[in-house]
Image (cartoon, rainbow, N blue to C red):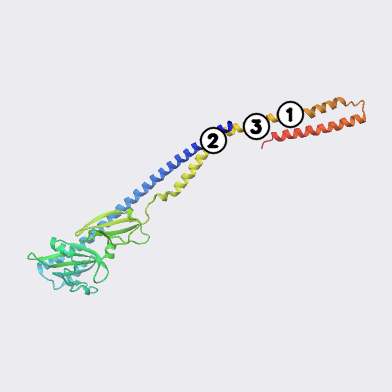
Amino acid sequence: MNYFKESINHRKHLLYGAVVFIVVCALVFLIAHQQYLIQRSTQERMLTNRAVIVQKQLETVVKNCQTATKTLSFLVENYGLPEDFDQIAGSLLEGTPCIDAIQLLQKGVITHVFPRAGHEKVIGYDLLADTTRNKEAFRAIKDHKFYIAGPFNLRQGGVGVVGRYPIFKDHKFWGMTAVIVNFPELLKAAGMENTPGGGFTYQFSKPDPETGEEVYFMPQNDHQVFASTVKVAVPDGSWTLHIMPANPVRFSDNWALLLFGIICASLAAYLMVHLLDEPRRLSNQVAQKTAELREIAWMQSHRVRAPLARIMAISEILDPDHYEPERDRHLIEELNKSSTELDEVIRDIVKRTEPN
């Protein structure tokens, strides 16, 4: 009955220990989750700040392109086709290192380009006749506005974006001015280079002019879900910048805290079970010691009494004034035997009373 009761109590204590383990683990998990939220909030704030900086830099590039094309268009509209095109174009490109070249188109045909070196292939190219590239150009003509096309593969090689501004004379379409921006230079000017060891990675996308689907121009990043997305308004719609952390914060980064929490929870559960079981252990020890004392008392009252009684009886029989060899020799043997037996009993008692 007692064993059954002790078994039930021990199971209750184990249950209490399990509850303590779960509660401590839950507290540690909440602390770790709160720390993760703080870390992620800090990282998102950094991403947002970085996105604003990149946005401003990219908008500056777009404005420089727009200024160059509008200035050249103004000169053509008011003063005609410039004879010193190279000199004027060179002046326009000064201070705008991100612009790779500037072009002049009559109707849709490229007639002038500066610098000419490396861009000879585009001379005579009829943009409006190219159905794969003329959509943004026609939009610019229709809306009388500056538009940017691309990024796409350039005829002269490489990848770039092209900004175009229409020219009208007497309310009739005369041609266009255009600037070529090398795409890697655009990314560099905007501070969007994915350099190894940097704190951020970047993605650049834009709706396809035909399908409307988002087209990504940089290698896809596994951390896209963590991106701080900023839309940059440009004259032909919008570019979308995705700023991503090179090392995104994850909940699993707090593994050391979680491991420490599990260890603390295990210790707390063990101490709880140990403290709850302590009265039972003390009771068992008391019962054990009581049983040992009872056994010692029994030994003293039974095992010690028998040899002691014989020794006392023999002591009374022995008479030093009347020595009888035969009788006394036998009594002395019995006395030695009883003494030895008494000694063994006493040793056994002493051994039982010694601490374990």
Task: Name the mark nearer the viewer: 1 or 2.
Answer: 2
Quadrant of the rendered structure where residue 331 is? top right
Q: Is residue 70 left or right of residue 290?
A: left
In the image shown, does 311 or 55 lie closer to the viewer?
311
Q: Note whether residue 10 is visible.
A: yes
**215 in relation to 350, above or below:** below
Q: Is residue 118 left or right of residue 318?
A: left
Task: Name the mark nearer the viewer: 2 or 3.
Answer: 2
Task: Say which residue label 3 marks.
Answer: 289
Q: Quadrant of the C terminus?
A: top right
Q: Position of residue 339 (x, y in %)?
A: 81, 32
Q: Position of residue 323 (x, y in %)?
A: 92, 28
Q: Earlier in the sequence, mark 1 or mark 2?
A: 2
Q: Position of residue 308 (x, y in %)?
A: 79, 28
Q: Callout 1, which amino acid?
A: Gln
Q: Quadrant of the N terminus?
A: top right
Q: Residue at x 17, y 65 (%)?
A: 137
Q: Residue at x 79, y 33 (%)?
A: 341
SS label for mark 3: helix
Q: Callout 3, which amino acid?
A: Lys
Q: Is residue 271 left or right of residue 157?
A: right
Disc ID at residue 300: 1
Task: Say which residue label 2 marks.
Answer: 10
Disc ID at residue 251: none
Q: Residues within 10 Å of mark 2 (few under 14, many from 20)?
A: some
**261 in relation to 321, above or below:** below
Q: Position of residue 275 (x, y in %)?
A: 54, 35
Q: CA distance from mark 1 to mark 3?
A: 16 Å
Q: Callout 2, which amino acid?
A: His
In the image shown, does 83 or 122 lie closer to the viewer?
122
